[in-house]
Amino acid sequence: GAVVSQHPSWVICKSGTSVKIECRSLDFQATTMFWYRQFPKQSLMLMATSNEGSKATYEQGVEKDKFLINHASLTLSTLTVTSAHPEDSSFYICSARGPLDYEQYFGPGTRLTVT
Amino acid sequence: SQELEQSPQSLIVQEGKNLTINCTSSKTLYGLYWYKQKYGEGLIFLMMLQKGGEEKSHEKITAKLDEKKQQSSLHITASQPSHAGIYLCGADRPPTSGTYKYIFGTGTRLKVLA
């Protein structure tokens, strides 16, 4: 089946620094990728929809300048958390829409801890 | 308010007991997915339902989608500690403009006591 990878799987950074998370579709082209955030004991909240070659569509309440999303190719989307703060510590998951419209493949997630 | 509401929010059951988790949408669902997850880990795909009235089973888990395609239930028979985790329903949302977006329900945390 289709595989989506995320890198890094976990990262610890200092407050004020920026962190980039990569999401790759390994064996298929994904015109659309999604980024989610999850806090402990909570569900996954959609942050933004990323379309290849165009600007990401952010959900209400998500800061565009804080969470920079780039979908430069059909197999790679990146999420950059800029000027990270402890409250940005969370679990981030990406997903990619597969070759068939109803398919959705999820990355294994990235655990971000900001100290 | 959440577009996909799950109930209950959390559930603690004794091993061997049956349980049901519900996922309700205010709009017609164009495909409903069930996942299991533990916080900090990836999603485990359980089942996908597309047709009204559809029912699928895998091992001790059965999922149904109602005829109106606005509510789905996940039923676990004879629960085991290995069933513990967060259960999430997911669905596509038609766009108001642009691309479909894929959202999750509010989640149900299940704990099974041995």
Image (spheres, rainbow, N blue to C red):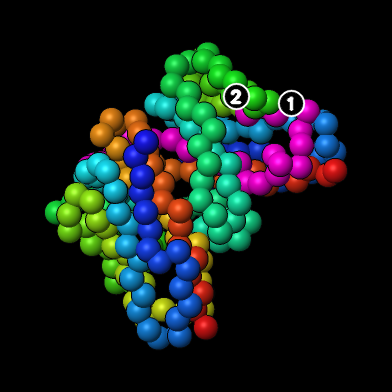
Hey, which quadrant is residue A102 in on the image? top left
Total count of labels:
2
User: Which of A31/A67 is in front?
Assistant: A31
SS at mark 1 in the image: loop
What residue do we see at 56% from left, 19% from top?
A: B56
Q: Residue furthest left?
A: A53
SS at mark 2 in the image: strand
What residue do we see at 58% from left, 41% from top?
A: B36
> Tag on residue A10?
none
Q: Which residues are magenta?
A: B74-99
Q: Chain of mark 2?
A: B
User: Which of A30/A90 is in front?
Assistant: A30
**What distance separates the C-alpha of mark 1 from that of mark 2?**
11 Å
Q: Are marks 1 and 2 on the same chain?
A: yes
Q: Is residue A111 above or below residue B10?
A: below
State the image coordinates of residue A20 (x, y, percent, origin top left).
Answer: 33, 71
Crowd band around label 1 with a 10 angstrom C-alpha radius: few (<14), some (14–19), many (20+)? some
State the image coordinates of residue B54 (x, y, percent, origin top left).
Answer: 52, 15
State the image coordinates of residue B74 (x, y, percent, origin top left).
Answer: 63, 29
> Tag on residue B58?
2
What residue do we see at 63% from left, 56% from top?
A: A41
What residue would you read off at disc 1? B77
